[in-house]
Amino acid sequence: MKIPARFLRLAPLLLAVLLLAAFAAPKLKKTALTKNLTVGVPEGFSALPDDGIAVKYPSPRKPLAVFSNSSGRVDFSVAQKPSTFTSRDYALLLKIYKASIQNMYSKVEFLSEDIRTINKRDFVALEFVSTVADTRRTSNLAPIRRYQMVQYTITGDQLTVFTFVAPAEEQPQWQPTARAVMNSIVMK
């Protein structure tokens, strides 16, 4: 079958449009979580109500906010907890949280780990793909793999944790969004 010449001339243009769409900056909605904290929440994400948070994130300390995409497979959450660390402890926090993450999962592949400044505030940032495998002899469950980006920052006596989680197989789709969300954080 011969492809008409007019379609062949349009192929580079179509390819360019598709590439631009694939790498377009994700659209974020500026959202105030507290009077001193705003974040960019991806369009199409909605805030989980308190009972939804309690079901999805059972914990004695409820996150400040959790936002999910329409399928509920991708989440962005913000949590705070008391901390005795100070802003001078970021190098130590990086080591502690990296080790903690490695102990939490069967396997961890770190994509990035650093201390970065975003909007005049320092953050410990860890980006990784985690795997949880069921190691029971009688189990034949497939491992659960997740793409995660986590940032930690200290304000006074509080540690604030920002977490973006998506299925590992959707990492190429969500990684630019996770990075944009984390770069949108503004804390006063």
Image (spheres, grey):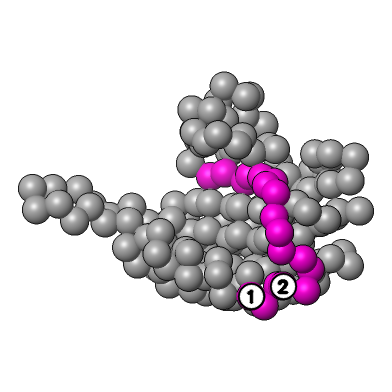
Residue 83 visible in this rendered orientation of the protein: yes
SS category of the residue bearing label 1: helix
Query: Label 2 is placed on what type of residue?
Result: Asp
- Using the image as rendered, state which of residue 122 and residue 127 is in the foreground: 122
Magenta-span inclusion, residue 86: yes
Magenta-span inclusion, residue 177: no
As drawn, the label of residue 66 is none
Residue under label 2, please give it. 89
Separation of residues labelled 1 and 2 (CA atoms)? 5 Å
Task: Tell me the quarter of the picture where residue 32 sits.
Answer: top right
Q: Are marks 1 and 2 in contact (CB under 8 Å)?
A: yes
As drawn, the label of residue 92 is 1
Q: In the image, which residues are magenta? A: 74-92
Query: Label 1 is placed on what type of residue?
Result: Leu
Question: Considering only vertical position in the picture, is 78 above or below 173?
Answer: above
- Using the image as rendered, state which of residue 7 and residue 55 is in the foreground: 55
Give the image location of residue 167, x and y in percent.
Answer: 44, 52
Give the image location of residue 82, x and y in percent.
Answer: 70, 49
Which residue is found at the position 52% from the left and 63% from the top? 172
